[in-house]
Image (cartoon, helix red, strand yellow):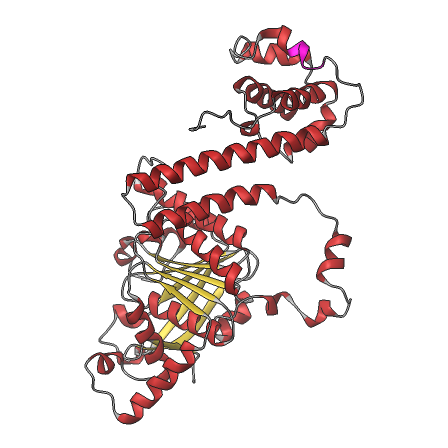
Amino acid sequence: MSDGRPLPRSPEAEAAVLGALLLDNAHYQAAAGCIAAADFSLDSHRRIFARIGDLLGRERAADIVTLSEELRRTGEIAAVGGVAYLCSLTEGLPRRVSIGEYLRIVKEKSLLRQTISAADRVAASAAEQINAPEVVLAQAEAVFHGIAGQAATTGLESVAAFLQEAYPRIDSIFERSARQAGIASGFAALDALTAGFQPREMAIIGARPSIGKTALACNIAAHAALAGKTVAFFSLEMPKRALIDRICCARSRVSLEDHRHGRLTPCQKGYFLQSLGDLAAAPLYIDDQPEQTPLVMEAKAARLKSQAGLDLILIDYLGLVRPETRRNYENREQAIAGVSRAIKAMAKRLEAPVVLLAQLNRELHKRADKRPILSDLRESGAIEQDADLVLFLHREEYYNRDDPSLAGQGEIIVAKARNGPLGTVHLHYDAQTCRFSNPGE
């Protein structure tokens, strides 16, 4: 530590854990569910724990003899103190050892060390004065939130225990279906197909530029917020006022262009102001800071969840999310993959659906059929792999503007649904008001 005090650690508890594993390999399941090799303070203990795991993973016994041979094979026997140190790990331990208390000590010391290390990084970041204070604070909040999450891990749970908590009355199983649990998009056919946006899942809305990704996201955000759901909208491209103007024009069905140029009639102004008042009373939160990292956005969303709840997160858009600076990526594809994994993890940790907008690559324009397919997801196949739901926004009118029969026609193509069917949903799009709607509305 910077003040000269030693870091929290308990080499005795660590040695007791390793000794218990060598005495009874059956303890490994409990240990692996609680700690990882990185939780040991000593490098030799990290190496020993990892090699025990390797042996058991290959369905081989892990004892003094087999472990020493494995360490010789990997060239680590000297680094761990030799066979004599391995033998010392089991000295003084009872044949029937209770490993739980040792694991608790090891994990607690690890969490304290991680907290100190994180605090040092935050202090260094603040001292450098490169980032704005709110960015440093958001990064700190995200890091500490991740450490705290390790202290609240849960293991396997019986179905009986889960049902007792989730369904206190048996008839509530029928009162609350999975379809009702999702966040509705506001488009009846899409919600019928997907059951809404589900907690802990990442949904991708992909399209080429100018097709209407942001307009669709605004429609979804407004519908959810006006239904009483708490919505966090991270707009990395468009400022708050522009988003609010779009939402209110769509809700009041007035031309965005006329609103920008002050050409609204008194009646249209009344509709717009009514929409603005409705939106002001809705739990919609917008953050328009550019180039945010997943950790910063997660910290802000976690803070909102603790203060007002959190039902839905929208991010516009993937290409503008900044990878974590502490990692060095070899190319753009790896960076996008890292961002995608981080946002998927955000959805799981915050237990809320994340709707992530993404641009499709230019290969789409080279095909006679301009309908998007999964391979059109730009820059990384990891996006398709991480996503639970992939929706493509398509407007044939954009590619065939001379055909008046295509005016206003829009489609949402459900190209991937981890827990549901695929299909196509037809919508109407009014470019003047930036409004997507169900056909006939």
Q: Is any part of residue 194 visible from this angle?
A: yes
The tally of labels here is 0
Tell me where residue 436 appears, x and y as whole percent: 38, 76
- Residue farthest to the left? 261
Along the viewing direction, whichever of 96 and 28 lies nearer the viewer: 96
In-image side of 294 versus 87 (left or right) = left
Whether residue 5 is situated above or below residue 408 in the rendered picture = above
Q: For residue 112: magenta?
A: no
Residue 124 vs residue 81: left or right? left
> In front: 278, or 70?
278
Instruction: Give how far across and how far down residue 285 sits, in percent.
Output: 41, 66
Q: Residue at x 60, y 42 (%)?
A: 151
Q: 414 or 39: nearer the eye?
A: 39
Q: Residue at x 64, y 35 (%)?
A: 34
By secondary structure, the bulk of the magenta-drawn segment is best described as: helix
Magenta span: 86-90
